[in-house]
Image (spheres, rainbow, N blue to C red):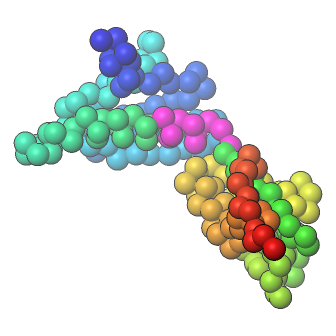
Amino acid sequence: MTKKKEKYIVKIPIDTSVLYCEKKKLLTVIGPTNRKSLKLKLKILIQKKTKILKVSSIPFFSMSNSEKKKLKTLRGTTIALIKQLLIETSTLISQKLRLHGMGYRVSFAERLTEDALAFKLGHSHPIFFKLSSNLAASCFSRTKLSIFGTSYQDVTQMAAFIRSSRSPEPYKGKGVLYENETVVLKEGKKV
């Protein structure tokens, strides 16, 4: 019984402050790196002394019987969004990529702008990616790249977009891979 109650509780970090406006249905989290807001569908309770946030099962609006069945999933989603908000405001999020293949290289495109990346991925031409204003990148070597940002969605979306330009093929394993990703190779034709 205690695990179900603990499921909808979030501990607020010491260096983070949380502002809640019930009239506007808005939760604002102010952390050391960023400030972000979240529009809520369920009411929350904040205990200031213990720095604990609880998500209740009371909605802001009236619900039909079919929507009340989905209340448990909505409550879980709200907790997940609040946890993600706390992480995004307190730390810098990064995604690391590595290039595997003969001649596969990454560098900053000096001719275009400072926030553009140039990739050589086995095509007859280089491929350019322009980073948005809230993202930054660093090249550790010619085959290793890291993307930084304050938004988890933006960082992972850019990493997935870069990876889709040359996803790893199953026979030699060449392509753009995440740092810890391994490719299970298929066996080729036997002569």
Side of 61 relative to 105 (left or right): left
Residue 158: x and y, percent? 64, 63
- The quarter of the image holding the N terminus is top left
Kindly tell me whether residue 147 is visible in this rendering. Answer: no
In the foreground, 146 or 148: 146
Q: Which quarter of the picture shows residue 183?
A: bottom right
The extreme left residue here reads 65
Kindly tell me whether residue 36 is visible in this rendering. Answer: yes
Q: Residue at x 26, y 27 (%)?
A: 56
In the foreground, 188 or 96: 188
- The quarter of the image holding the C terminus is bottom right
Q: Residue at x 46, y 18 (%)?
A: 51
Residue 69: x and y, percent? 16, 39
| Residue 85 among those drawn in magenta | yes
Q: Which quarter of the picture shows residue 134?
A: bottom right
| Residue 58 among those drawn in magenta | no
Side of 180 relative to 38 (left or right): right
Q: Which residues are magenta?
A: 83-92
93 shown above or below 164: above
Magenta-colored segment: predominant secondary structure: helix
The extreme front residue here reads 191
